[in-house]
Amino acid sequence: MEQRPKKSGDRFDGYWLRDEAPALGQFMAYLMPNRADNEAHINVDIDCRPLDAYLAKKNEGLTEDKYTYFHIFLAAMVKCFVLRPRMNRFISGNRLYMRDHISVSFVVKKKFEDKSEEGLAYKKYGEKDTIDTLHTSIMEEIHQCRREDVLDNSTDMMTKLLKLPRWLLHIIVDILFTLDRKGKVPYDLIKADPNYSSIFLTNVGSIGLDSGYHHLNNWGTNSFFGMIGKKHLAPEWHEDGTCEVRPVISLGLTLDERIGDGFYYAGTVRLLHKILENPEILEQPFDTPVEY
């Protein structure tokens, strides 16, 4: 990620794009100020056959902490954000910013039981990371989150706030939203908040659900939410009119349409398809160029 000195108006997590963004993009931040009112949703089917072949190769000889679809999808998204940096923008307080890092977040179920608590995971990655370094750090985070005696920073803070009287909690939340718009929320409160990540990803396929639409939140800065669905069979039509059935995973992507335009998003989806059709690409540093 580009690193440059912070100026007045910049945030602890990003740079204010004063005159670097088109006038339309800057004006949209005032015309439609709420992130949840500016959602664009894309649903794509990903062919599982190259993914399955790659996973069989990566997991050969492994008995635990195996590579999964989740690792591939997350690594592919991080690589897209490295190569397509406008995806890492966000709007807060009517201003357009470029995030100064790439971060990912996801929910970890401590146990696959109805009454089990959920943990929130938050990780940062750089241009020189690969799927292997990402896999190692993700597995470490999952093992940490699944410890019953450990609460993540965000969950711990919410637990403490919920013990306050309701009238006081309402006031605190209003103050927090004001600070949020100005980028002034105390760092200790949000250092692991998934709503402040570049990529928020959920794997509902792991609990047997299809992918679909998931909203964005007005709290925080997250402008990209991904949902991985379960593996299923789908028809594939060819130019000669023939059809075959193939295994696919549906991927639902919700993003803030104010941070880019349709042409840029379409290019990102093409790149994502290219990577997932050739997952060996992820063995190289994420900043390695890809033709697509």
Image: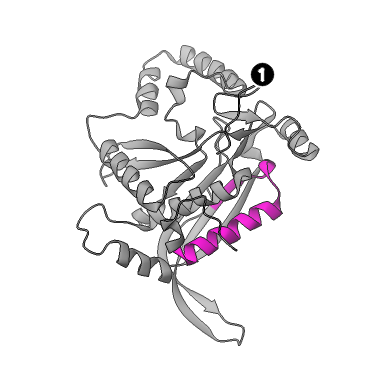
**Taking 21 as reference, is 194 left or right?**
left
Measuring 34% from the left and 30% from the top, which residue is drawn there?
Answer: 152
Coloration mode = one colour
Does the image show residue 209?
Answer: no
Measuring 53% from the left and 83% from the top, which residue is drawn there?
Answer: 243
Residue 274 image offset from top left, x and y in percent: 54, 64
Residue 64 image offset from top left, x and y in percent: 21, 54
Q: Is residue 70 above or below residue 153?
A: below
Answer with the quarter of the image where residue 153 lies: top left
Measuring 54% from the left and 62% from the top, which residue is drawn there?
Answer: 273
Q: Is residue 108 above or below residue 61?
A: above
**Start and end of the magenta stretch?**
253-279
Relative depth, front residue between 250 and 221: 221
According to the image, label 1 marks what residue? 8
Answer with the quarter of the image where residue 263 lies: bottom right
The secondary structure that most of the magenta stretch takes on is helix
Q: Does the magenta stretch include residue 211?
A: no
Q: SS class of the residue under badge 1?
A: loop
Measuring 41% from the left and 38% from the top, which residue is drawn there?
Answer: 123
Q: Is residue 187 above or below residue 68?
A: above
Residue type at mark 1: give it.
Answer: Ser
